[in-house]
Amino acid sequence: MTARRLKAMVAALALAATVPAVPAHARQSAQAALPASLHAQLDAQYDQVIADLIRITETPAPPFKEAARAALFAQMLRDAGLKDVTIDAEGNVLALRPGREEGPVMVVSAHLDTVFPEGTPIKVTRAGERLLAPGIGDDSLGLASLLAWARLLEANRITTRQPVLFVATVGEEGPGDLRGVRHLFTKGEYAGRIGAFISVDNADAGRIVNGAVGSRRYRLGFKGPGGHSYGAFGIVNPMVAMAEAVRGLYAVTVPTDPKTTYSASVVSGGTSVNSIPDAIVLEVDMRSSDPAALAALERAMLAAAQAAVAGENAARSTRAGAISLEPQMTGDRPAGATPADHPLVTSAVRASQAAGFAGRLDDSSTDSNIPMSLGVPALTIGTGAGGGRTHSVDEYLETGRERFVAGLSVGLAVILDYTEAAPR
């Protein structure tokens, strides 16, 4: 046993002795990664966490319009007992909890934004032990979990070796392109001062994301002269060039290990059914956990688009003008990884398994992409009791109490272990 682990164990035992005793039945159901009394306190917060979850979910946070939810969450952090709560220039909510020592901070984060556009009806409904609403699991659940952990740390006057910075980020989803966490690490007050990072961003407490799937997203503009479908018949058509670009992309062979993918996702443009379009736009998504594989795929996609334009200009008349290509990168999420044997990862695996979950490693695209790409130890964990239909209007969470509290315990256990928590 290392000195760090021995010290953490002693601290945990001391911490357990400082909080009220719990009945025998609570001790028997408590999770091994967390002192029984703290697990009982999490259980006692269950109704409060569900109320927080509903309140957060029903405060809309569409892409680039997270301000209302940010203001709400900042006040909820203050109500949880945190005093140093601010909103930065990008819109992230920051709440610093000092540590016993100065030095790099540990960030515990969840994201404010949802994928749903402004005006989407959002009302939480219940079906038995299931709660349903757009964005309730992604990521209102993560935000509610942060509040529960902050309340418990404050109520028990628990200290951590390093400062803990609770963060609610903007711009994690889609077009946000990780703008909140990118600002945190590159331009924000704590840039260069973050030593570890945890993102809470799914409802599966058995899933531990230690690999960052990188992505490149493009908007490819195919432009031409346009004209009447009958009178100008025979001239070049940007629709044809776009279609050929898609065919060329789907002829690209990509590795299966590491998994590398592409998708021609959105097409727009044209004027009317009886017009040759003058502009067609194609949106493409490409992903891989290997930066080299992603770069190779990006080159192949652009080459396919350029070849499609050249082919259309050669195949039909350019008397009114030629087809041109205007590629625009709309998303750039870097790849990276935290080694499976890093203490942050092994702590999360142990906590998940001790709480009765699978504790399995996975790859994904989350806020953790940015710190992983910078070499900062990072991972993304789940919380709660599970759910489904993410990114749909009928998204749901399971809220059966015992399983939900067990899932909620995982993140707190990681924080306590990694920061060598102790009673104040």
Image (cartoon, helix red, strand yellow):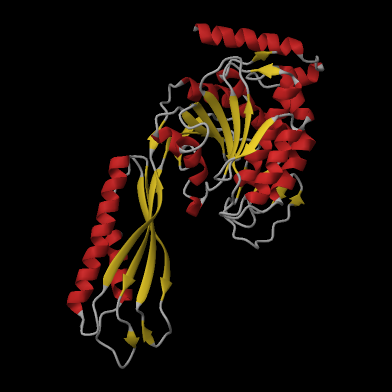
The foreground one among 66 and 380 is: 66
Residue 32, position as x, y percentages in the image: 65, 18
Total marks drawn? 0
Percent x, y of residue 313: 20, 75
**Where does the C terminus fall, quadrant-wise?**
top right
Q: Is residue 324 shown to the viewer in this render?
A: yes
Q: Position of residue 247 (x, y in %)?
A: 29, 65
Please give left or right for residue 185 compared with residue 101 in the image. Answer: left
Residue visible at 20% across and 85% down in the picture: 319
The residue lying toward the viewer, choosing from 298 and 381, is: 298
Asked if residue 1 shows in the view, the reply is: no
Quarter of the image for residue 419 reads top right
Left of 191 or right of it: where is 422? right
Q: In this view, does 382 lie to the left or right of 27?
A: left
Q: Point out residue 182 in the picture as x, y percentages from the top left corner.
A: 47, 41
Q: Residue at x 28, y 57 (%)?
A: 301
Residue at position x 69%, y 29% in the image: 150
Who's the residue at 56% across and 54% down the image? 64
